[in-house]
Image (cartoon, rainbow, N blue to C red):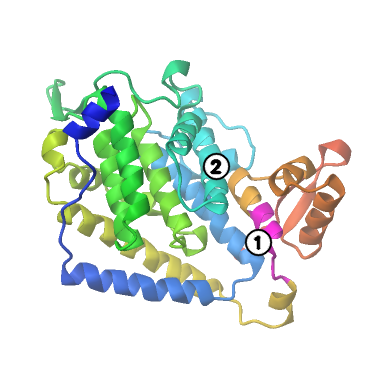
């Protein structure tokens, strides 16, 4: 009943915005590029290369936005299972984000709508061993404030999120809106989801990373994933100040609910459009002209799941394949062997220690 009272105080999400001609034109161009990318005949090993690079960029950029100082090459090493020199907390942040990306892939394949429990699970993966256990995968129990550090060292409160008791109901409202607003363009829905999630600020820590992952998940579930090589986080990370300014539409929650979100959506779509141009150039530069090799390398649904796992985690074992495919061990081994034979993955180790990694050819680097 307490939650219901707060939901009444904070009504169902009803974003206010207008759509400019520029925004419409960018959405139209994005749709054209989406079709072009979907129809492009990429050899599987080339697509793996692009997706591997995108996963690394996502993990690097999203954690970098929050202050993580690891370089992109170090994130690549962590994604490949290597040990690196660095602050343990920062290493943990990146490893957690890679795990969370794997969960996003799993959720995207399983269903079209994600739930509150899915949100909590993603948060739990993001902050594992970084916050107190009672704050991991749990909505905050007290107030939080978004502050800027002024040149003199003092704090300036720039945004006050809603009371903690309102959070569960507000998150449910947001997910209900996401499910019911199918007349809104998926890219606009993703942008509004991102803004409203950060506006609610449901956790004590990890809101930015979790919000960006949920935005990604929504794009995956609505087939606006661009073969999973689109990296919106890179756009935000190139100018973090602009990203935070765009999000800052009012100083407290009630006022934000009445704010015009047009400027935020224009920023979000501009970033989307900018990153899609990069995807288009990458895909066109690697597009196969077809032929027997392309036909031989066509992957089925199970093989794509294996590729997804390798791209996200850096390697896969036969036990991993059994788990993600829900098939007997012999069947999993046969699928891994096929991918090895056509040059998509390569075997490492021997016996029980055998695992597979992406077979990235020097020519594709």
Where's the N terminus, which quadrant? Answer: top left
Q: Is residue 15 above or below residue 25?
A: above
First of labels 1, 2 by sequence position: 2
User: Taking 11 as reference, is 169 left or right?
Assistant: right
Foreground residue, 66 or 191? 191
User: Taking 360 as reference, is 8 left or right?
Assistant: left
Where's the C terminus, which quadrant? Answer: bottom right
Residue occupying the point 16% across, 67% down:
20
Residue to which mark 1 is pinned: 362
- The reply to whether the C-beta atoms of the residues labelled 1 and 2 are less than 8 Å apart is no
Q: Position of residue 301 (x, y in %)?
A: 67, 61
Near mark 2 (Cα within 10 A), the count class, few <14, some 14-19 or many ≥20, is some
Q: Is residue 250 among the parts visible in the rendering? A: no
Foreground residue, 4 or 310? 4
Segment tinted magenta in the rendering: 297-307
Considering the whole magenta stretch, tell me its main secondary structure. Answer: helix
Q: Is residue 103 magenta?
A: no
Choose mark 1 or mark 2, whichever is in front: 2
Mark 2 lies on a secondary structure that is: helix
Q: Position of residue 113 (x, y in %)?
A: 45, 49
User: Taking 75 as reference, is 324 left or right?
Assistant: right
Mark 1 lies on a secondary structure that is: helix
Q: Is residue 270 above or below residue 329?
A: below
Q: Is residue 320 above or below residue 152?
A: below
Residue to which mark 2 is pinned: 103
Residue occupying the point 42% across, 44% down:
213
Residue occupying the point 77% across, 40% down:
319
Q: Is residue 300 magenta?
A: yes
Q: Is residue 48 among the parts visible in the rendering? A: yes
């Amino acid at each position: 009943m307490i939650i219901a009272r707060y939901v009444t105080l904070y009504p169902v999400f009803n974003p206010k915005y207008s759509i400019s001609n520029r925004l419409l034109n960018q959405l139209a161009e994005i749709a054209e590029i989406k079709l072009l990318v979907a129809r492009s005949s990429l050899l599987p090993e080339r697509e793996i290369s692009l997706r591997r690079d995108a996963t690394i960029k996502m993990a690097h950029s999203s954690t970098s936005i929050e202050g993580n100082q690891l370089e992109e090459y170090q994130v690549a090493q962590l994604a490949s299972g290597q040990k690196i020199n660095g602050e343990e907390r920062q290493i943990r942040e990146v490893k957690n984000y890679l795990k969370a990306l794997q969960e996003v892939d799993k959720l995207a394949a399983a269903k079209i709508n994600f739930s509150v429990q899915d949100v909590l699970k993603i948060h739990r993966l993001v902050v594992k061993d970084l916050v107190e256990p009672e704050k991991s995968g749990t909505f905050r129990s007290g107030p939080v404030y978004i502050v800027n550090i002024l040149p003199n060292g003092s704090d300036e409160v720039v945004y006050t999120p809603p009371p903690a008791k309102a959070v569960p109901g507000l998150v449910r409202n947001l997910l209900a809106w996401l499910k019911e607003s199918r007349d809104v363009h998926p890219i606009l829905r993703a942008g509004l989801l991102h803004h409203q999630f950060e506006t609610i600020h449901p956790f004590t820590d990890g809101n930015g990373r979790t919000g960006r992952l949920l935005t990604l998940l929504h794009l995956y579930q609505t087939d606006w994933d661009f073969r999973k090589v689109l990296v919106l986080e890179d756009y935000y990370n190139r100018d973090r100040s602009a990203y935070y300014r765009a999000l800052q539409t009012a100083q407290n929650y009630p006022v934000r609910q009445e704010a015009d979100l047009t400027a935020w959506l224009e920023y979000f779509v501009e970033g989307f459009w900018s990153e899609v141009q990069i995807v288009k150039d990458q895909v066109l530069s690697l597009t196969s002209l077809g032929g027997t090799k392309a036909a031989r390398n066509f992957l089925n649904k199970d093989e794509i799941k294996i590729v997804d796992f390798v791209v996200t985690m850096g390697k896969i074992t036969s036990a991993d394949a059994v788990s993600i495919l829900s098939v007997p061990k012999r069947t999993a081994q046969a699928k891994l062997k096929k991918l090895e034979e056509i040059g998509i993955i390569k075997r490492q180790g021997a016996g029980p220690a055998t695992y597979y990694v992406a077979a990235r050819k020097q020519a594709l680097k």
